[in-house]
Image (spheres, rainbow, N blue to C red):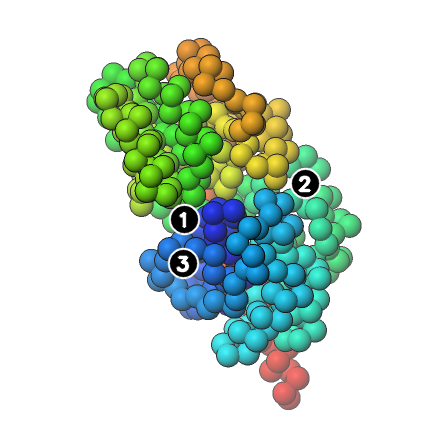
Amino acid sequence: MGFRVDVAKHIGTGHLQRCLTLARELKKMSISSIFFVREYDKELLSLIVISGFTYYIIGYAASEDISEDHLNWLGVSQEQDAQEFINAVTKQHIDMIVIDHYSIDSTWENIVKNAISLPIAVIDDLANRKHTCDLLIDQNYWPKLNSRYDDLVSGHCSRLLGPKYSLLRDEFVSLRESKAQKPSDELKTILVNFGGVGNMEVWKIFLPALVKYNKFKFHVITGKLPSEDLAYCKNMVKQFKHIFLEEQTDQMSSLMKVSDFALGACGSTVWERFCLGLNSALIDVADNQKDLVHYLHEKDLVDYLGSLNTITVGSICDYLEQLSIESIKCQARTVNIMNLVDGMGAARVAKSIMVIHFNKYNKIILEKI
């Protein structure tokens, strides 16, 4: 299996993490995977190696100043990226391609299909561009979900749509079924994290609010930050015993299980929280998160704090002042969000990929007969 996905400060880690989850599930089915990436930040690429997989660098960004517009995240044209991918794939053995990239659409997919004729699966959640693919996965919760891609993919494309296909790691299923070992102290614990790549704009608003408010304990995970920014954050909270701050953790699922509430962004972590029944209040840190967080709030599944450019220290303090974690409203939400995400999505997606993989293999055998 070949994954075309990138990880970088301007992209975040969520796309890579869900691809790694799917690769682990495929590995159980004896399908090996290799990740084809552009190099933006080599340190972030270590996430692939740590997870037990290999990667192949197909190229680099043409410019260090990459647009925040997700359509330009590649840093090069789709045509160049596609050709560099084709050049890399000829040196490897793969039977199928999985793409998780907001900068890639049918332009890239047609070039690659015409050159190497492999089945393509696309992981998407924007529904804002056409795809030439055999399978489309959108794990998010949208209005009119079943018709969302009608004009964007062909009729023969299989679609796996909705949170039942959320790509969550195995431990979320086991933790979901276990009893939480809650801390014995009286204060409720709020987990605070806005993604694997740290964003100082977020922390300059949230940390001053958290230090003012000792009604709760806060476990803060900043995400990867430059050393001077991390030092700034640690210095801000070091005098406050109700705040524990760390840059990264490999225990996120366990922390979600023992926490009583979460403050976060509207990324792929939403479905991890839902699976474990962890209620949350969210912000959107990018334009591509706005529609989803508004819909989740409309369906009364999360609280919405506002956009990064509208929230203030005061608005966060006001929210924490009125927050009642044990309210009937929160208890009802816990049931609803757990019903929406059962943690088995990765297995469902992997089985669908196996069907495509099996059909391709049989077609090759028949052509040889």
* Point 75% across, 58% down: residue: 154
- Which residue is farthest right? 151
Q: Are marks 3 and 2 in contact (CB under 8 Å)?
A: no
Q: Which quadrant does the C terminus fall into?
A: bottom right
Mark 3 sits on what residue? 42
- Amino acid type at mark 1: Arg
Query: Which disc is residue 145 wearing?
Result: 2
Instruction: Please indicate, yes or no, whether residue 352 appears anywhere in the rendered image.
Output: no
Which image quadrant for residue 236? top left
Mark 1 sits on what residue? 169
Q: Tell me the element at label 2.
A: helix
* Point 43% across, 66% down: residue: 55
User: Looking at the picture, how far across and down is residue 205, in whole percent?
Assistant: 44, 24
User: Looking at the picture, how far across and down is residue 352, in whole percent?
Assistant: 56, 59
Which mark sits nearer the N-terminus, 3 or 2?
Answer: 3
Q: Tell me the element at label 3.
A: helix
* Point 65% across, 61% down: residue: 77
The CA span between labels 2 and 1 is 24 Å
Which mark sits nearer the N-terminus, 2 or 1?
Answer: 2
Q: Closest to the observer: 296 or 346?
A: 296
Taking the image as shown, residue 29 lies to the left or right of residue 108, namely left
Which image quadrant for residue 225? top left
Above or below, 53 against 298 in this view is below
Which mark sits nearer the N-terminus, 3 or 1?
Answer: 3
Query: Which disc is residue 339 wearing?
Result: none
Q: Residues within 10 Å of mark 2 (few under 14, many from 20)?
A: few
The CA span between labels 3 and 2 is 36 Å
Q: Residues within 10 Å of mark 1 (few under 14, many from 20)?
A: many
- Amino acid type at mark 2: Leu
User: Looking at the picture, how far across and down is residue 265, in whole percent?
Assistant: 49, 33
Front: mark 3 or 2: 3
